[in-house]
Amino acid sequence: MNQLLPALLWTLFGFALGTLPFSVWVGKLLLGKDIRQFGDKNPGATNVLRAGGVPPFVLALMLDIAKGALPLGLAVHIFGVEGWALVPISLGPPLGHTFSPFLNWQGGKAIAAAFGVWIGITIWTMPLISLSLLIVFTLLITPSAWALMLALVGMLIALLLWFGDPVLLGVWAGQTLLLAYNHRANLKVRPSLRRRKKSNQISES
């Protein structure tokens, strides 16, 4: 019971922080554009890149990552929250990003917020592993939603090998279910290997 109130408060704090649509605000304030009119219409940092280039994208991405990193980092490393309380707390930021009242409860896909959660909990270990896996599978597999799922499977293997902590497995399970829900439309597309584009060679006789 002594963990119940802190878990509830940190979950609410993480959810509230997650609802802030930083990428949309960066697009409007710095670019004068609605990023939801670009790309896949998602209110995330990738469409900031499509709308206005690298610097605004980096700012939006860092802010979205901070949604997860800040509350989890404070809870775990400053206030000493541990155990199963971390499972609901870890879901707060990506849930807030997914269901934002600022966007009529229509948010983003929460990849950056979920990535930030792992920064907050493990500092660099799982973020480095997950990012490496995501890059590799994105280069190999299309659509990218399936690359994300494969990266999450790789994360599960890493968690079992290096940590073996059931709490972290619970965090992984919650985030995997949410990310699968957010990418459900693209997951209906059959995955395939990306084809390398061959440059046209003109032979002269």
Image: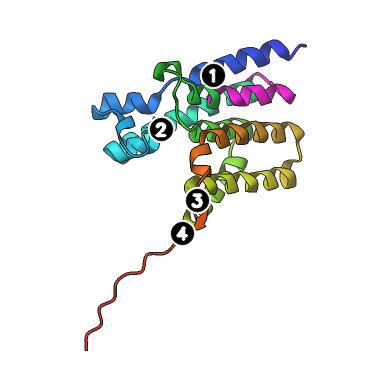
The residue drawn where x is 29% and y is 76% is 201
**Mark 3 or mark 4, which is nearer to you?**
4
The part of the chain drawn in magenta is 78-93
Amino acid under disc 4: Arg
In the displayed structure image, the side of residue 6 where residue 199 appears, left or right? left
Judging from the image, what secondary structure is the residue with disc 3 in? Answer: helix
Judging from the image, what secondary structure is the residue with disc 4 in? Answer: loop
In the displayed structure image, the side of residue 32 where residue 2 appears, left or right? right
Dot 3 or dot 4, earlier in sequence: 3
Amino acid under disc 3: Ile
Residue under numbered circle 3: 135
Judging from the image, what secondary structure is the residue with disc 2 in? Answer: loop
Amino acid under disc 1: Phe
Give the label on residue 44, or none.
2
Residue under numbered circle 4: 194
Disc 3: CA contacts within 10 A as few (<14), some (14-19) or many (>=20)? some
Where residue 114 sits, quadrant-wise, is: top right
Separation of residues labelled 3 and 4 (CA atoms)? 13 Å
Q: Is residue 54 above or below residue 13?
A: below
Separation of residues labelled 4 and 2 (CA atoms)? 24 Å
